[in-house]
Amino acid sequence: MVQQVTEGVSIMVETFYQPGQSNPLSSEHLFAYRITIENLSMNPVKLISRHWHILDSNGTHREVQGDGVVGIQPVIRPQSTYQYTSGANLHSEIGKMYGTYLMENLSNKKKFTVTIPEFKLVTPSKLN
């Protein structure tokens, strides 16, 4: 698990290889990741958008941008958490992801960027 705090917002990431939804013979590897966003500040914040970088060890680099996460723009109250699970597919057994969330402080309407720490996506066979 990796964690990083930016402007009073903590991002924690856990990853899980999905063997039942992967096809190693076709170089298709699916990973799930669980993100826990904790608002350590004294103001409610809203997650406006996301920007991901997804890198395969074969040199492929993809970017994904969009509003909210998993179809919503959650509001996270002070000292509260929001958690969601999503996934990414790779065409190699090793990769990584990192990115940012655009957030809004709902008390003063100021927008700010929160860093999503880099995390590795590795098939169990490569962990030995």
Image (spheres, grey):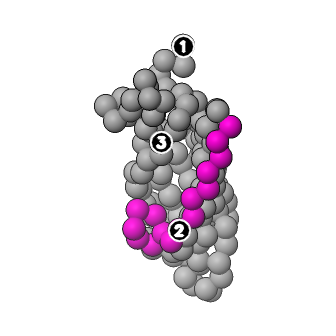
In this picture, which residue range is highlighted in magenta? Answer: 59-73
> Image height check: is 67 above or below 35?
below
Can residue 102 be spotted in the picture?
yes
Split into 4 quadrants, where in the image is the C terminus? top right
- Residue drawn 44% across the image and 47% down it: 87
- Which badge, 1 or 2, comes first in the chain's sequence? 2
Specify few, some or many for label 3: CA neighbours under 10 Å numbering under 14, 14-19, or 20 or more: some
Q: Which mark is residue 89?
A: 3
Against 49, is 98 above or below? above
SS state under label 2: strand
Visible residue check, residue 42: no
Q: Is residue 62 magenta?
A: yes
Residue at 67%, 67% in the rendered image: 113
CA separation in Å, label 1 and label 3:
21 Å
- In the structure shown, which secondary structural element does the residue marked by tag 3 occupy? strand
Q: Which residue is mark 2?
A: 66
User: On the rendered structure, is 8 left or right of 32?
Assistant: right
Which label sits on residue 128?
1
Left/right placement of residue 109 relative to residue 15 reads right
Q: Earlier in the sequence, mark 1 or mark 3?
A: 3
Kind of residue indicated by mark 3: Asn
Q: Secondary structure at mark 1?
A: loop
Q: CA distance from mark 2 to mark 3?
A: 18 Å
Q: Amino acid at mark 2?
A: Gly
Nearer to us: label 1 or label 2: 2
Query: In which quarter of the view is residue 31 placed?
Result: top left
The residue lying furthest to the top in this view is: 128
Do residues under tags 2 and 3 come within 8 Å of each other at their CB atoms?
Answer: no
